[in-house]
């Protein structure tokens, strides 16, 4: 097709599977986010990851570590539902994975159930199967199926109203999400706040940087993370405490030890 100025282009419809993402982004525009940029020394953890058998990926390690930090700060594992807070009993973590289907890359969500009770290797295996195994079905509830048939403005209004009801908000998936962009970049990453996540951890690329260690400037493996909190659920002080717990667990490689059962 040719435009008025002679520009050539092709029109393609927005994929249907993209619509829920656009709805969540619209909802997220009304939220207030607190961001924390941290760089963690993972030199010791990196040595253990290289020697780990079965294999452990950085993303699997981070998800396991985040889950164990959430156990120590259960206020993070919550969601606002109207004028109430919905606190989850289990630490489930939603992780984004990129699959190749019909020759094109598509974004999918792998939900790691009870991530705090799984090892880094078990989570790594789940992520690998989500990325390269058969596509997982995401069955829709009758309510969701009805919502997706509505026009955009009506659908988003209905979703906002439904999210105020705890029984429905509980079905919107985990409150904690991890997205890794480390394979695409050599530095930091910024998350786009996507409802209904209370905490999003964006994993950057592990790189060697000069750092002060035992009073000496030496090369160390550093992992950049961006933590994005929903300020409607988490205030600054609890977010800071969670961040320090996550730092301690990450730098000591605690999630490489057997998980509590």
Image (cartoon, grey):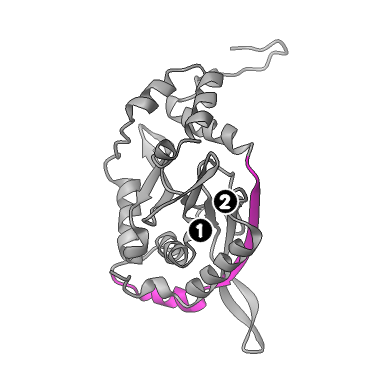
Query: What's the CA distance linking mark 1 and mark 2?
Result: 8 Å
Residue 108 in the image: state x and y as whole percent.
Answer: 40, 41
> From what the image shows, is residue 161 above or below residue 6?
below
Residue drawn 47% across the image and 66% down it: 69
* Sooner in the amino-acid sequence: mark 1 or mark 2: 1
Q: Nearer the viewer, residue 251 or 142?
A: 142
Residue drawn 50% across the image and 16% down it: 151
The residue to which callout 1 is attached is 75
In this rendering, would 257 be left or right of 246? left
Q: Which mark is residue 142?
A: none
**Category of crowding for the residue at label 2, using alpha-carbon neighbours closer than 10 angstroms: few (below 14), some (14–19), many (at least 20):** some
> From what the image shows, is residue 2 above or below residue 257?
above
Residue 227 visible in the picture: yes
> From what the image shows, is residue 59 above or below residue 169?
below
Q: Nearer the viewer, residue 108 or 153?
A: 153
Residue 171 in the image: state x and y as whole percent.
Answer: 39, 39
Q: Nearer the viewer, residue 30 or 83?
A: 83
Residue most extreme to the bottom: 215
In this rendering, would 13 be left or right of 240? left
- Asked which secondary structure carries label 2, the reply is loop
Residue 247 in the image: state x and y as whole percent.
Answer: 54, 71
Q: Is the residue under label 2 in contact with that under label 1 (CB below 8 Å)?
A: yes
Q: Quadrant of the N terminus?
A: top right
Residue most extreme to the right: 5
Q: Which residues are magenta?
A: 31-53
The residue to which callout 2 is attached is 233
Q: Quadrant of the C terminus?
A: bottom left
Residue drawn 40% across the image and 76% down it: 48
The reply to whether the magenta stretch includes residue 41 is yes
The reply to whether the magenta stretch includes residue 91 is no
């Amino acid at each position: 097709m040719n435009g008025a100025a002679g520009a050539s282009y092709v029109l393609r419809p927005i994929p249907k599977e993209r619509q829920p993402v656009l709805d969540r982004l619209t909802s997220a525009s009304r939220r207030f986010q607190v961001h924390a940029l941290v760089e963690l020394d993972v030199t010791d953890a990196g040595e253990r990851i290289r020697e780990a058998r079965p294999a452990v990926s950085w993303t699997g390690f981070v998800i396991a570590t985040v889950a164990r930090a959430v156990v120590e700060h259960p206020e993070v594992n919550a969601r606002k539902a109207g004028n109430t807070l919905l606190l989850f009993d289990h630490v489930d973590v939603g992780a984004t994975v990129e699959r190749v289907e019909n020759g094109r890359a598509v974004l999918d969500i792998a939900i790691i159930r009870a991530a705090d009770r799984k090892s880094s290797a078990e989570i790594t295996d789940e992520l690998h199967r989500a990325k390269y195994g058969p596509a997982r079905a995401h069955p829709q509830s009758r309510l969701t199926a009805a919502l997706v048939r509505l026009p955009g403005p009506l659908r988003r209004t209905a979703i906002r109203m439904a999210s105020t009801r705890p029984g429905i908000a509980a079905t919107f998936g985990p409150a904690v999400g991890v997205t890794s962009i480390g394979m695409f970049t050599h530095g930091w990453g910024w998350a786009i706040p996507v409802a209904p996540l209370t905490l999003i951890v964006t994993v950057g690329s592990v790189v060697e940087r000069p750092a002060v260690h035992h009073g000496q400037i030496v090369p160390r493996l550093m992992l950049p993370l961006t933590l994005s909190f929903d300020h409607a659920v988490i205030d600054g002080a609890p977010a800071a405490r969670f961040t320090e717990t996550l730092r301690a667990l990450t730098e000591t490689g605690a999630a490489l030890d057997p998980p509590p059962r």
